[in-house]
Image (cartoon, rainbow, N blue to C red):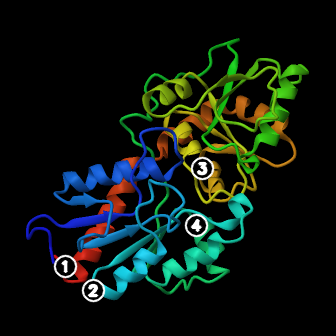
Amino acid sequence: MFFSKFKPTLAISLVPARSSWGGASPFVSQLANCMWRRGWRVVFDLKREPDVVLVIDPRRDHPAKKFGLEDLEKFRDRSPQVPILHRINECDQRKGTNDIDELLRRTNALADHTVFISEWLRDYFTERWFDAGLSQAVIYNGADSRVYHPIGNHMPGPGETVRIVTHHWSDNPLKGFDVYQQLDELIVAGNLPGVAFRVIGRWPANIRWKATETFGPMTGKPLAAKLRECHLYLTASRWEPCGMHHVEGAQCGLPLLYHEDGGGIVEAGERYGVGFREDLPGAIRKAVERIGDLRHQLLEKLPSGERMVLDYADTIQRLAVESGRL
């Protein structure tokens, strides 16, 4: 039963948080605002029958996650005509777990269309269980351009210290903290003169920074302002499906220094960054030398939250129309 003949409804499984809480939360905020502008109602439960369901994370391990796999199975039984869109943004390899891939497989079996947040993640699951012949697309992440933009970011002037930054809300070691500690030690040892490092967010409790400027978790405008004070963005996260941290840095005007085992991050880094695996100082020197060209490439290919959510909104609308809901 429709809520309104003139106001279609989208049900999303995740309520956006107001604080730093990973990449899915700002995605939901952007998408919900886009759908509202298009005249849609957005809800975060399955109490009444919506016109399209968007499931992001089928786990029920946080209060912000309002419905999961079991809820979707019951919903599919009572409302088989309502299309389900499954956004896959996670995998076991990312955090060294062993239960997420199977949970996503079971959830995906209920979906009418799948969106992967990177080609790397699509290929990862195609090697495991996903049928590439099914309805699917890749939509890369973008941040809110009202907040994360390059206006006010500047190239380093002659003799100015080049500031490198990273930020993470998670303190999981696979976010790259071994590399961040290495950079801290290189600066202390005097091996990278004219370079400074900034870490924003959380980090493992055993790390004692020596030369690094640190800030607690931030989000939104305060975070973007801190990013724009810098010149290069460093991400050493391993096997990341895509992530938002490097996207936010890039949209603030910062070319990427990225680990070549970074998963979906590599797809952005290859467009406007310098990769590394063993030779971090060599990559930093190369990026500093090429920073003008890299920044130009970045500004030509800047990620965009608007483009991202429009792709999702068009997909949601198509699913609703093709299903006969609208």
- Place residue 235 in its image quadrant: top right
Q: Nearer the viewer, mark 4 or mark 1?
A: 1
Q: Position of residue 127 (x, y in %)?
A: 67, 80
The residues bearing labels 4 and 1 have C-alpha atoms spaced at a distance of: 30 Å
Residue at x 30%, y 53% (from the top left corner):
32
**3 or 1: tag closer to the N-terminus:** 3
Say the numbered circle drawn on residue 271: 3
The C terminus - image quarter:
bottom left
Residue holding disc 2: 81
- Label 2 with label 1: CB-CB less than 8 Å: yes
Of residues 1 and 63, which is closer to you in this image? Answer: 63
The residues bearing labels 2 and 3 have C-alpha atoms spaced at a distance of: 41 Å
* Circle 3: element type: helix
Q: Position of residue 307 (x, y in %)?
A: 37, 53
- Label 4 with label 3: CB-CB less than 8 Å: no
Residue at x 63%, y 70% (from the top left corner):
100
Q: Amino acid at mark 1?
A: Arg
Mark 3 surroundings: few (<14), some (14-19) or many (≥20) residues within 10 A: some
Q: Position of residue 20 (x, y in %)?
A: 51, 39
Mark 4 surroundings: few (<14), some (14-19) or many (≥20) residues within 10 A: some
The residues bearing labels 4 and 2 have C-alpha atoms spaced at a distance of: 29 Å
- Label 2 with label 3: CB-CB less than 8 Å: no
* Circle 4: element type: helix
Say the numbered circle drawn on residue 325: 1
The residues bearing labels 4 and 3 have C-alpha atoms spaced at a distance of: 14 Å
Q: Nearer the viewer, mark 4 or mark 2?
A: 2
> In the displayed structure, does residue 123 sit left or right of residue 175?
left
Say the numbered circle drawn on residue 57: none
Q: Amino acid at mark 2?
A: Gln
